[in-house]
Image (tube, rainbow, N blue to C red):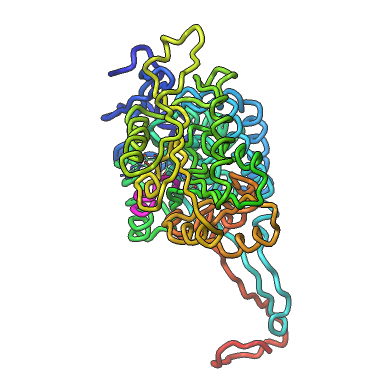
Amino acid sequence: MNAVNGKHLRHWINGKPHDGPAERRGDVYDPATGRVSGTVDFAGPTEVEAAVAAARDAFPAWRDASLSKRAGVLFRFRELLTRHRDEIARLISAEHGKVVSDAAGEVARGLEVVEFACGIPHLLKGGFSENVSTRVDAYSILQPLGVVAGITPFNFPAMVPMWMFPVAIACGNTFILKPSEKDPSASIRIAELWAEAGLPDGVFNVVHGDKVAVDGLLEHPDVKAVSFVGSTPIARYIYETAARNGKRVQALGGAKNHMVVLPDADLDLAADAAVSAGFGSAGERCMAISVLVAVDPVGDALMDKIAERVARLRIGPGHDPRSEMGPLVTGPHRDKVASYIDGGRAQGATVAIDGRATPVNGGEDAEEYRDGFWLGPTVLDHVTAEMDAYRDEIFGPVLSVVRVSSYDEAMRLLADNPYGNGTAIFTNDGGAARRFQNEVEVGMVGINVPIPVPMAYYSFGGWKASLFGDSHAHGMEGVHFYTRTKAVTARWLDPSHGGVELGFPTNG
Ligand code: NAD
């Protein structure tokens, strides 16, 4: 199906929309209606080359732009993003499906990274040691890498790119974003705001597309570093391919986030948290809680409280302020997620809440939303570690409840799980919480906090199969990822220099 009079998203290269013809295009959907709302150009080698050339040509001047000039552009960009936050949220909601308030939240979390990057003059300070040897000084300089690329997933079309490019650009790099082809509009609006903020042409570029565009970036010799966020199989591929091509790479992958509820926990708090973190954004968050680990004897009471809360949730189109949860991103994804309901039952789970029966609140426009990609909140109880519903990253509104008899059994479950993105423990026992934070092999830990997304000045990243590479995103790890350190040893000649000396330089 092709869009009739729909929007047409083009690449953004060298400060403007790219006007070359597209050999391939993809459809963009409105998930609430299930209809195509526009098309997006897909980049081939020619467009990737054009974007890399623009970024390469822009690099020398941007690298040499003063820190205060760079910070000035970032401050203006921050103001523009703040002003256009709701507009960007509506663009996201219309293509992703999440409710507008949730989309505004993701823009706000991205803005925090922009604010962090506004402090770049401080962040790029190197070290200085006077007199490391007699009248010899040593110091370090942090320099940008050159052209760097970011490849991002559908579920946070504004926030995840903003984990990357504010820091990369502030450090003096030029950037090429390959956003998800499923919801590309936010990236183009952001590119326009960068231009309005005074960012020189070519410093921020967007190429749309699929594997062809990604492979073009991974293989291009002028792309010096790649940041990726997406599913684990693709993250592994990006990591291996980029590394093989000599690039610096950080590749954040999928997740299966467990929330452990100990017997002494506040069960109302835990139930609120499980429902919020399980079904917010229809479970399409890398930090969503997808496994609830109920330590005996809390299981039954917790299930009752969760059921009460789920019954009150309102499912509907993202632009309706009364909606709490929108549709899933595409029809095939909704079908795959829904398949875990019958699949879970066949493997022995109890379908406590079946989201296929949840009504969609379309109000007077109910007919308009009949073919949307809907699936209501679903709870599978008595899930075990052998079941597909436990093993796979479902990435939708399906919460699996695993019942265990002890804290130690809960910890074994987490230790055996291949993912290590986020986790949470709910308890009133400080000692148990402290032991949990110490023992658990997960990168981001919440204590009575279900979605512990780190602030911009900490870094975001998981462990195990949730991250390939050694740098997490944003914070000081982001600054480290997007710079190379140069160590300088300097001696300004004075009358005491000692002539030829073949021995290895030591301090004296
Ligand atoms: P995805 O892996 O399908 O796609 C991510 C990006 O890779 C997109 O830009 C896509 O166009 C590109 N891509 C897809 N297939 C490719 C291929 N074969 N070769 C090269 N590039 C390819 O992920 P998605 O469905 O867009 O997003 C959801 C996934 O992202 C979930 O697994 C979720 O957990 C993960 N995610 C992780 C984090 C994190 O911080 N760890 C954050 C957000 C999302």
Please, which residue is most extreme toward the left here? 23
- Observer-nearest of 280 and 21: 280
The image position of residue 432, as x and y in percent, is: 65, 60
Instruction: Judge whether residue 224 is colored magenta.
Output: no
Q: How many labels does the image show?
A: 0
Is 234 included in the stretch rendered in magenta?
yes
Q: Residue 370: horizontal and vertical position, in percent?
A: 39, 14
Between 2 and 486, the one lying in front of the other is 2
53 over 493 or under it: above or below: above
Determine whether, in the image, residue 312 is placed left or right of residue 82.
Answer: left
| Residue 172 seen in the current view | no
For this orientation, the residue located farthest to the top is 364
Dominant SS of magenta comes to helix
Image quadrant in which you'd find residue 434: bottom right
- The quadrant of the picture occupied by the N terminus is top left
Give the answer, above or below, for where 426 lies relative to 91. Answer: below
Can you tell me which quadrant of the image ligand 1 is in? top left
* Residue at the (39%, 20%) spot, across then down: 372
Quarter the C terminus occupies: bottom right
Q: Where is residue 234 in the image (x, y as percent from the top left)?
A: 35, 48
Is residue 226 visible to the viewer in this orientation of the structure? yes
Q: Which residue is drawn at 63% across and 63% down?
A: 435
The residue that appears at 39% across and 24% down in the rendered structure is 373
Please identify the quarter of the rendering in which residue 489 is found.
bottom right
Give 145 or 242, whichever is nearer the viewer: 242
Tell me which segment is drawn in magenta: 229-238
**Residue 437 % position (x, y):** 61, 60
